[in-house]
């Protein structure tokens, strides 16, 4: 369960259909090397959080739950409508066990994420007594990703999406992986303040970073060493890419 005695919970966001997969099957049920991608993510979460893993399901919830239940025991939360990442976490919070002080949030479509990387992230968050931590990675071509804005080396002041970024911000190569570790009490209170005032009408978890900065909370970043670990799957092409990486480098990503 890691080097620290204090347990964490991991919330895995797996409610989406994944329209760009051009399939009726829920995205997280697509297979990599003959195994549904969600099971790789669940394995990593279990290695870090033990029994404190909550899977947020929505599209084809019964099928996703049945697939995971065949392999292991986790808790489930249902997101009836896909109203954004912030909304998904709201749906999950009631399932987080009492006594858990820190919550890790990750997506169900990053099967290459290694347990050692996730554990290092959690340990870094706790040892530095942060309210919120962002797991980020340097990319030679950061196009399309949210840029992590820092003051100094480690203090995060915000995340700027590409569409909103200035030319100077677009030059930043440190990008958000969408993986967070957040103090539970702050998360519960701050999710209530997120608004869906965007073109998609969705509640975005990234907004919590700006709110934490406004509240002068300690926000830090842990930088992943291997960009391959953070490749998300949104299309058949990306599925093939990840399968190739996993086939050749699985031992390095464990």
Image (cartoon, grey):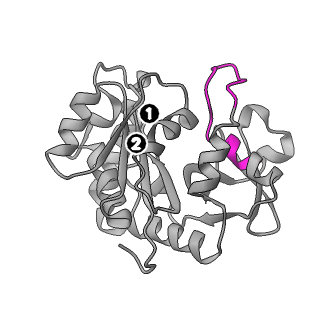
Where 213 sits versus 36, above or below? below
CB atoms of marks 2 and 1 within 8 Å: yes
Q: Residues within 10 Å of mark 1 (few under 14, many from 20)?
A: some
Q: How far from the left and from the top, in percent, is residue 56?
A: 39, 38
Q: How far from the left and from the top, in percent, is residue 187?
A: 61, 50
Indicate which disc residue 176 carries. none
Q: How far from the left and from the top, in percent, is residue 2?
A: 39, 75
Residue beneath disc 2? 109
User: Relative to 142, is 155 on the left or the right?
Assistant: right
For the C terminus, give its image quadrant. bottom left
Give yes or no for residue 204 being in the magenta stretch: yes
Where 251 sits versus 86, above or below? below
User: Relative to 64, is 111 on the left or the right?
Assistant: right
Q: Is residue 139 visible?
A: no
State which region is magenta. Answer: 195-210
Residue beneath disc 1? 234
Q: Residues within 10 Å of mark 2 (few under 14, many from 20)?
A: many
């Amino acid at each position: 369960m890691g080097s620290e005695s204090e347990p964490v919970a991991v919330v895995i966001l797996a409610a989406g259909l994944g329209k760009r997969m051009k399939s009726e099957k829920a995205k997280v049920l697509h297979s990599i090397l003959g195994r549904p991608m969600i099971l790789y993510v669940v394995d990593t979460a279990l290695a870090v959080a033990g029994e404190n893993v909550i899977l947020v399901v929505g599209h084809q919830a019964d099928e996703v739950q049945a697939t995971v239940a065949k392999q292991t025991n986790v808790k489930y939360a249902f997101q009836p409508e896909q109203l954004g990442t912030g909304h998904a976490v709201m749906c999950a919070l009631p399932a987080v066990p009492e006594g858990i002080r820190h919550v890790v949030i990750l997506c169900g479509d990053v099967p290459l994420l290694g347990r050692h990387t996730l554990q290092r992230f959690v340990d870094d968050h706790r040892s530095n007594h942060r309210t919120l931590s962002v797991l980020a990675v340097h990319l030679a071509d950061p196009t399309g990703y949210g840029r992590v804005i820092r003051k100094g080396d480690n203090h995060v002041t915000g995340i700027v999406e590409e569409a909103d970024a200035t030319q100077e911000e677009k030059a930043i190569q440190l990008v958000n992986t969408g993986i967070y570790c957040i103090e539970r009490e702050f998360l519960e209170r701050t999710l209530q303040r997120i608004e869906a005032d965007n073109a998609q009408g969705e509640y975005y978890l990234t907004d919590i970073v700006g709110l934490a900065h406004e509240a002068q909370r300690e926000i830090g970043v842990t930088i992943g060493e291997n960009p391959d670990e953070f490749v998300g799957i949104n299309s058949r092409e990306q599925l093939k890419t990840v399968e190739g990486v996993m086939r050749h480098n699985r031992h390095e990503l464990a």
